[in-house]
Amino acid sequence: MEKPQKMPKVAKVKNKAPAEIQITAEQLLREAKERDLEIVPPPPKQKISDPEELADYQHRKRKAFEDNIRKNRMVISNWIKYAQWEESQRQVDRSRSIYERALDVDHRNITLWLKYTEMEMRNRQINHARNLWDRAVTILPRANQFWYKYTYMEEMLGNIAGCRQVFERWMEWEPEEQAWLTYIKFELRYKEIERARDIYTRFVMVHPDVQNWKRFASFEERHGFISGARKVYERAVEFFGEDIMDERLYIAFAKFEEGQREHDRARVIYKYALDHLPKERTAEIYKAYTIHEKKYGDRTGIEDVIVSKRKYQYLEEVRTNPNNYDAWFDLLRLVEEEGNVDTIREMYERAIANIPPSREKDMWRRYIYLWINYALYEELEAEDEDRTRQIYRTCLDIIPHKTFTFSKIWLLYAQFEIRHKNLSTARKTLGMALGVCPRDKLYRGYIDLEIQLREFDRCRTLYQKFLEHGPENCITWMRFAELETLLGDTDRARAIYELAVNQPRLDMPEILWKAYIDFEINIGESRNARQLYERLLERTHHVKVWMSYVKFEMSHSQEEGIEPISLARRIYERGNTALRESGEKEERILLLEAWREMEKVHGDEESYKKVEAKLPRRVRRRQAVIAADGSEEGWEEVYDYIFPEDEAVKPNLKLLEKAKAWKKKQEADNQTNDED
């Protein structure tokens, strides 16, 4: 049985503290470099002194190269080294033979062709090099390096015609842009402007990019052919057409015209581009157009450009979010300023077609104003009555009246019909509105309309319907009574007020009572007004009612031969008593302060001091803070008011305080006796 293999013991590091001197990797490398422990001696230099020794050396080298090639003939670097060595031995024929053998192995190797031709050129074998370039470009016509080297060689040899012929052969393959530009530069070096123009003409057809058309035009402009440059731009615009328009071309064309001080031509180009380019691609056009107008245009031209730019921005906004009604308003305002009726109508139709997706009234508020503006434009600007009527009716059909409505639309439509003397249609419209969606604003608008028409019987009928719809609306009762007052029927107005104050529920009863009292005062019925105050005080003891009552008595009781100050004091006394019983301390203080001011003005010193004695003093006390669940959260200090009258009513309060003080004194005396 085999013994289990023991694991080797690992030496344990007892001291893990860092060494005092730390050694870095950089230090190790530097020391190794300084020591140079393994110095390899250089190979000995050999000097060949006789032909036999040279032949032996060449034989050994050739055998080594041939062995390497035989081992792996596909490694082209071995062939190239072999050929270069033969060249160094002045054996050009042998080097040429090696290159040919290598081409038989891999004739598509670009490096091999380049090394071969460079060898021929170094040894001034021009015809051999030319033949090699011909073979190379025939076998690999897409290898641009061969064409570049070939043309460069012919140009250096001064063979301009031959170089041009090579370029022409190259251009038949429609190479990349740089090859064409090289050919053009070649012709320009020898001042062949017409030939360069012909090359540019072919070039922009093979590579029809905007940048190349701009190069062609710049070439014409640079050589002074202004009309030629303009024709190039015009040909480019015609070539691209309206389907694949590019803003860069139009900007370059306009800047060319600007450089020739043809500012009107530049404006025409900018406007044409803005009219035909897609809106999302006109930002750069607007920018360039604005700069041009700021430099060379008048104020009107600048404003036109800015308006066009804003219009483009608004179009982008409504395209991104069709329910952005604020952008629609801004866009429509700009379109209306242009004055084209068909365009304005088309834009309004596009705007109102974007119905809010939700049935929430907040989302419809801005949308409805699109219809209103559309109708007002058709009525006031276009003066098309039938179209305006159709807009209002279509808008009313779209609004979901069962969910919500817009009283403004109904009233505007009715007012429109009245302006065009269709009174019966207006009344039918408002009647239908009240039947479909009765709203306070509709009732008020209908009533105001009938008042303007002086149809007061219709107004009474509408007020009756209005009050049946909302009997708690105090404003309606007041306006109904005011109408009767204006018509001189005070009995009917008083009856309306009586019906109103006897309603079980009112939204603002205080203003209704005030209106009723003011009505009686205005018609000179002070006695009735006094009775109304008394009736009101049976319902409420609000401090404002008492103060208003006092003000009334001070103003009107003298007319009846009664001293007003005594009546006012009586009312203040009653008010003070009522508020004391109800426990309204804040209101009671206000009442007493008003009473004091009255005595200061109309009373004497004794009466003033009497009221002054009724005012409370403010004390500070603690009270428990009760949480929402009924538990105590602590204590807080609050201010309270103690009225002298309240203390007089409770005489036992002081007696209880004296009893507590006596008890404390007794406890203190007993504690002293026990200690003794």
Image (cartoon, rainbow, N blue to C red):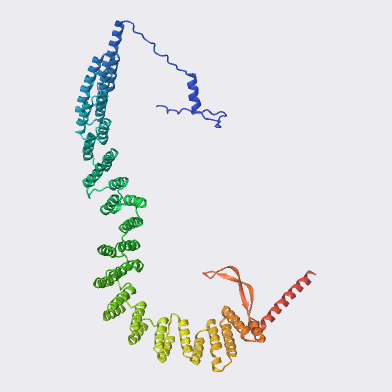
Residue 250 drawn at (x, y percent):
28, 48
Give the quadrant of the C terminus: bottom right
Residue that appears at 28% across and 13% down:
90
Q: Nearer the viewer, residue 19 or 448?
A: 448
Give the quadrant of the N terminus: top left
Q: Nearer the viewer, residue 621 or 166?
A: 166
Q: Is residue 79 above or below residue 189?
A: above
| Residue 12 visible (yes or no) | yes
| Residue 71 visible (yes or no) | no
Q: Nearer the viewer, residue 218 or 653?
A: 218
* Farthest right residue in view: 676
Which image quadrant is residue 574 in? bottom right
Residue that appears at 22% across and 39% down:
201
Residue 154 drawn at (x, y percent):
24, 25
* In the image: residue 535, left or right of residue 400: right
Q: Is residue 133 above or below residue 362?
A: above
Residue that appears at 58% across and 92% down:
563
